[in-house]
Amino acid sequence: GSYSFSTIKPGAHPLRDGSTVMRAPHLRFTIFASGIDRLVTQIFFDDETLNSTDPVLNCIEDPSVRDRLIARRVSEGEYAIDIVMRGEGETPFFDDWAR
């Protein structure tokens, strides 16, 4: 299905308190569904320069997989991304990275 929501685009923030490493602006998504405990991912924005140094985004070595976490700007203040639950083009979920 299709879903949309409105929010304020987040800003960059330090990796942790006192850190000089900055996280790129991103949204954290948790998906709950029947038969699934939960899936967690993060969505980044294609027009952010900090994407190139974000430690979470860049822990995904394959650029074609990493690109699945980057929303593309479609108009002023509007971004689009497909979140694929399973199969070809599946969105990377943190659950997958912990294995």
Image (cartoon, helix red, strand yellow):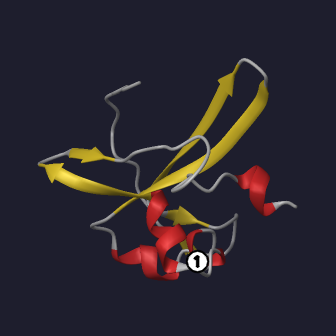
Q: Which residue is mark 1?
A: 58
In terms of depth relative to the viewer, which is nearer, 11 or 70?
70
Q: At 60% across and 49% down in the image, what residue appears?
A: 87
Instruction: Residue 29: name its quadrant.
Output: top right
In terms of depth relative to the viewer, which is nearer, 71 or 88?
88
- In the rendering, at what x and y percent does residue 88 appear? 54, 55
Amino acid found under the numbered disc labelled 1:
Asn
- In the rendering, at what x and y percent does residue 83 appear? 48, 43
Q: At 28% across and 57% down in the image, what residue appears?
A: 72
Label tally: 1
Q: Residue furthest top?
A: 34
Point out the image quarter for the N terminus. Answer: top left
- Asked which secondary structure carries label 1, the reply is helix
Q: Residue furthest front?
A: 88
Point out the image quarter for the C terminus. Answer: bottom right
- In the rendering, at what x and y percent does residue 39 appear? 70, 39
Label 1: few (<14), some (14–19) or many (≥20) C-alpha neighbours in 10 Å: few
Q: At 40% across and 56% down in the image, what residue appears?
A: 11
Viewed as shown, does residue 10 lie left or right of 80?
right
Q: Residue furthest left?
A: 76
Q: Is residue 12 above or below residue 41?
A: below
In terms of depth relative to the viewer, which is nearer, 90 or 23?
90
Viewed as shown, does residue 43 lie left or right of 58?
left
- In the rendering, at what x and y percent does residue 53 appear? 51, 82
